Image: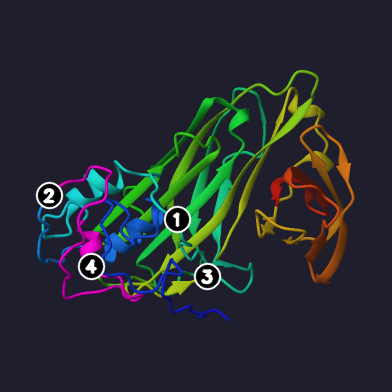
């Protein structure tokens, strides 16, 4: 259903928390500073309450705060959004705490409550590369859009996105994202793009409004990735670069979550692009693979009939999987005999070929 909403004890499985220390930047108090904290910050922005005894954004446990009059839907007090303890949720809480302490952890990490949707029943993130067949050394842009004219975002206040990409195929791990100055999300707003220092091939994007008012329905581009393709492995005539969305959390001004469908951008890299046949080119339609990581069962959704599907490890060894067609272009994959590890799922639809990474737990 288009207007499906999930009312949260949002973004965490946490019960209301009081009288716990403040870790500056971990606004939702779930044990890690990441893109979701910006969504909480955006809802509390401009609020005021009792300051802490000490004003600090150092990554350490600060004294439990005096509770403020306001709380988030899950019961967590707004005082946790006052990252520096000044008594006001303002730009300093983002610049000096969320941004500076990104990816730092404490205690046990709890769920952020991401809500991935299904293509056709939820608005979709769109990843659109400027080219899908290139030679090594090419510079490429990949547009990131939220929703489209046929399936707009019903009510927008903020979105947090976790994504992965094939870092080993980029020149000096070149991977940048630039927000469009005139994108459809109107001000006041805050934007966030970060890459964990110790996790090559991972990145996070978050955008939030700051005035406690939802916007929408709406859709459109919010920014572009810029990449430089590295040379392919010696001995190969072609290889595949992919950028894919792992997890999404789209919320309105009340922190209600709206499912969004993910997407994958696929780019074929060839020593000579004229030698690459149509069957080797990436599928034009998006391929959605979930959950990822997976146990012994996962699902794949295509926008064209699936003709072939195989699972390989990093050494190129094939593993037995069972593919069951559930409905039109939706399939269940049974990998119960596959050991834990990182694999490539290689397939072909009537639109072309694709390759996606999957972790089997």
User: Considering only order in the chain, which callout, 3 or 2, is on the residue closer to the N terminus?
Assistant: 2
Would you call the spot at circle 2 few (<14 residues within 10 Å), some (14-19), or many (20 or more)?
Answer: some
Q: CA distance from mark 2 to mark 4?
A: 16 Å
User: Considering only order in the chain, which callout, 3 or 1, is on the residue closer to the N terminus?
Assistant: 1
Would you call the spot at circle 1 few (<14 residues within 10 Å), some (14-19), or many (20 or more)?
Answer: few
Quarter of image, res 109: bottom left
Q: Find disc 3 in the rendering and name its residue.
A: 259
Vertical relation: 156 (above or below) 289? below
Disc 2 to disc 3: CB gap under 8 Å: no
Of the numbered discs in the image, which one, if any, rests on residue 108?
A: 1
Which residue is at 82% across, 50% downward? Answer: 338
Q: Find disc 4 in the rendering and name its residue.
A: 78
> Which mark lies nearer to you, 2 or 1?
1
Q: CA distance from mark 2 to mark 3?
A: 37 Å
Looking at the rendered structure, the secondary structure element under dot 4 is helix
Q: CA distance from mark 1 to mark 3?
A: 26 Å
Q: Determine whether, in the image, residue 163 is placed left or right of residue 297.
A: left
Quarter of image, res 267: top right
Of the numbered discs in the image, which one, if any, rests on residue 55?
A: 2
Q: Which residues are magenta?
A: 54-82
Vertical relation: 273 (above or below) 35? above
């Amino acid at each position: 259903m288009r207007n499906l909403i999930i009312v949260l004890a949002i973004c965490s499985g946490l019960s209301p928390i009081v009288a716990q220390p403040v870790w500056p930047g971990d606004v939702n108090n779930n044990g890690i500073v990441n893109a979701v904290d910006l969504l909480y910050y955006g809802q509390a922005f401009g609020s005021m309450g009792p300051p802490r005894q000490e004003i600090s954004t150092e990554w350490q446990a600060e004294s439990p705060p005096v509770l403020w009059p306001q709380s988030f839907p899950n019961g967590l007090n707004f005082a946790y959004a006052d990252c520096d303890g000044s008594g006001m949720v303002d730009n300093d809480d983002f610049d000096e705490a969320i941004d500076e302490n990104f990816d730092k952890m404490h205690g046990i990490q709890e769920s952020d409550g991401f809500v991935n949707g299904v293509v056709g029943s939820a608005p979709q993130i769109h990843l659109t590369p400027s080219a899908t067949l290139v030679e090594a050394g090419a510079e490429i842009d990949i547009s990131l859009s939220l929703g489209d004219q046929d399936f707009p975002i019903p009510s927008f206040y903020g979105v947090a996105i976790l994504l992965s990409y094939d870092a080993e195929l980029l020149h000096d791990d070149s991977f940048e994202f630039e927000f469009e100055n005139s994108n459809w999300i109107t001000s006041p707003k805050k934007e966030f793009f970060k890459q964990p220092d110790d996790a090559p091939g991972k990145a996070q994007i978050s955008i939030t409004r700051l005035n406690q008012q939802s916007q929408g329905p709406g859709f459109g581009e919010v920014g572009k990735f810029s990449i430089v393709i590295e040379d392919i492995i010696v001995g190969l005539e072609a290889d595949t670069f992919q950028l894919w969305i792992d997890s999404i959390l789209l919320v309105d001004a009340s922190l209600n979550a709206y499912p969004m469908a993910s997407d994958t951008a696929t780019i074929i890299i060839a020593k000579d692009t004229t030698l690459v046949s149509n069957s080797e080119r990436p599928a034009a339609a998006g391929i959605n693979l979930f959950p990822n990581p997976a146990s012994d069962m996962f699902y794949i959704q295509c926008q064209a009939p699936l003709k072939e599907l195989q699972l390989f490890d990093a050494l190129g060894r094939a593993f037995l999987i069972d593919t069951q067609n559930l409905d039109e272009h939706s399939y269940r994959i049974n990998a119960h005999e596959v050991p834990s590890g990182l694999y490539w799922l290689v397939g072909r639809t009537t639109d072309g070929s694709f390759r996606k990474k999957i972790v089997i737990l």
